Amino acid sequence: TPEPEICETPNCLLGAAYIQASLNRSFNPCTDFYKYACGSYPFNHPRHPDSYVRNVLGDIYNRNQAKLISTLSTSIQRLGSTSAEQKAKQFYLSCLDDYGRTKVGGNPFLEKVISKVGGWYVIDTMEDSYDYKNMLKKVHVDFWTDVLFTFNVKTDWLNWLKTSIQIDLSGMGLPWTYFVKKEFSEKLTVYKQFIRDVGTQLVVDAKTNFSDAKIKERVDMFVDDAFKVEQQLALVSLIYYIDLFTYMFDEANVDGNTKVVIIEKQYIIGLTKLVNNLGVDKQRIMNNYFTWRLAQKYVQELSWDYIHANRNFYVNAHNNNQFLGSQRYCLQLVTTQMSQAVSSLFVRDHFVDKNKQKAIEIIDFLKESMIDRLMDNTWMEQSTKDKAKQKLENSQYKLGYPDFIMDDSKLDNYYESLTITPGDHFSNTLAFNIFWKERLNKNLKMGTDRNVWNYQTYAVAAEYYNPWSELIVPAGMLQFPIYDYTLPHYINFGSIGTLIGHQLVHAIDEFGKLYKLDGSWYGTWWTNTTADEFVKRKQCVVDAIGSDRTQGPYDFMGTPQRVTMAEAAGLKVAFNAYKKWSDKNGMEKKMAGSKSTNDQLFFISYAQV
């Protein structure tokens, strides 16, 4: 019998080297497959000092982050005031300008924020006519800072085809439990010191003529007032919502009759009592509280004195010495604020369309395999099978990237209302408040734009999003070593194929059944008989896993049962899909340096994700 051919293309050899480097052949794969497949990974990929764990998906994430930094640091290719690329790169560079930020200190905050919200009691600029009710909407809308509560525009819970305003508890600088449980008293002391440090630095930058004693007195009052309100918020958890939301959603025609979703009803009701109980000093207390919430929001955008205060608080409150440096913080900021523009840059520099085309082929085989398993199973009634098949066939499959981000004119139009000023980081930060107000108004008025994905292209993620009946696998996930169009399919199906298969199961499992096929409202489409039969089989799986004492890295009994079941089902779906692909396209060349069969390499690839 002639020796099978060996795949010797560059990426085949690279994939072979990667797989071989993680194997530990001192273990028998028949008795401990995990140790055999992955036993050498920790030795060849030691944990970084700033990470708690290290794994394959984390490595891909870190490489994607490095790619983004490299891309954002390159010269601007498409110049022009409307260029989304120029705006993203200039915003990133302005954030990195430590010298410029140090030179201005806290003045941008005092001049561009505090002066617009009625001044600040501590430095004697609080307006005589100060009215916290009027300032509430400015703090929330003009400066995008949560005080007393938070709000957002989300998919409507009663109709997934629409959007609605949702209100939830917020307005505290720490989780509410910290304020009510005695074991967190030390963290509250650290938090108060943070408020004091920032307040003192702002007074210094304001260049008042106050004596040291007066500065201390005023800052002490600032700390007490801000902390008092947050503590009271935690305990409940006269707010003028109509005025605020008509100001925020002026373009979406919101009025007193507009329905909103209240996440924590008792908390929202309790706010009225809280404010009314502040007494004759209500305006001063609210002024100090608003000022603190604003300062905490923007502290990281100011000079090093403020950043250092934030770092001290973070390290002491969370017992974690790892604090984002300028580069990582600025990358996080630009990817959050200009995700579509950064996504476009990532795809142009670090993704090829052949990867997208090959992924579509893999999805088609996975769908076919999933439907075959559906039709063969014995616990679903035929009507349920038909609906499950319909959902899989009619779902949207979003792979790689949304088309609009590669269209310069559409992308520029998306950021049309955003003005970026080179070298003025604080003004750029405030410019996003205008931009996001416009975006939320559009979302409320027109509904969520489904061309804008829930995940950005550089994300390392795959998800079946049931409310919209869509599978999302961004370009950031379609990366070596778990996927590349030049890799053998036993690797691609074994790694990315099993991850996608897992997600496809969630389209039709006990969670996916809760979403009607049009995504408009919760409502099971399983028959009662199907649901009863599923419970029996689910218990069988739980019993089987509970009796398995094989040593491994995961506690499957501590994992949600539907996730464990989707993992197992996704593996079967992916393997059957690979066999279908092989039947159609023929056997692939073997991997260099390996005695394993292609089928065995499928399972090794699965184990190594």
Image (cartoon, rainbow, N blue to C red):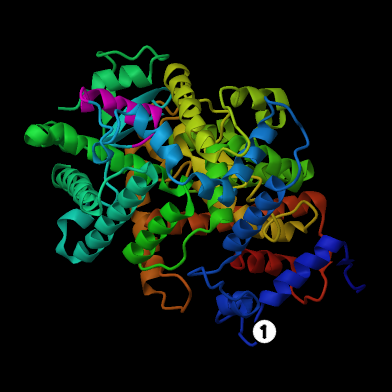
Q: 571 above or below 210?
A: below
Q: 76 above or below 319?
A: above
Q: Quadrant of residue 15?
A: bottom right
In the rendering, at what x and y percent does residue 537 appear?
A: 38, 56
Q: Secondary structure at mark 1?
A: loop
Q: Are there few (<14), some (14-19), or many (20+) residues within 10 Å of tag 1? A: some
In which quadrant will I find the N terminus? bottom right
Q: Which residue is mark 1?
A: 25
Visible residue check, residue 124: yes
Residue at (61% x, 35% y) in the render: 340
Q: 326 above or below 345?
A: below
Q: Identify which residue, 521 or 513, lies in the foreground.
A: 521
Visible residue check, residue 360: no
Q: Which residues are magenta?
A: 128-145
- Considering the whole magenta stretch, tell me its main secondary structure: helix
In the rendering, at what x and y percent does residue 214 appear?
A: 21, 49
In this rendering, position of residue 381 left or right of residue 260 = right
The amino acid on which the numbered mark 1 sits, given as a three-letter code, is Arg
In this rendering, position of residue 385 left or right of residue 14 = left
Instruction: Name the outermost residue toward the bottom.
Output: 26
Q: Is residue 268 magenta?
A: no
In the rendering, at what x and y percent does residue 92 appear?
A: 61, 44
Q: Identify which residue, 500 or 305, lies in the foreground.
A: 305
In which quadrant will I find the C terminus? bottom right
Residue at (82% x, 60% y) in the render: 588
Instruction: Name the outermost residue toward the right.
Output: 2
Q: 245 above or below 140?
A: above
In this rendering, position of residue 361 left or right of residue 592 = left
Residue at (58% x, 39% y) in the render: 339
Q: Identify which residue, 245 or 98, lies in the foreground.
A: 98
In this rendering, position of residue 525 left or right of residue 568 = left
In the rendering, at what x and y percent does residue 275 appear?
A: 13, 34
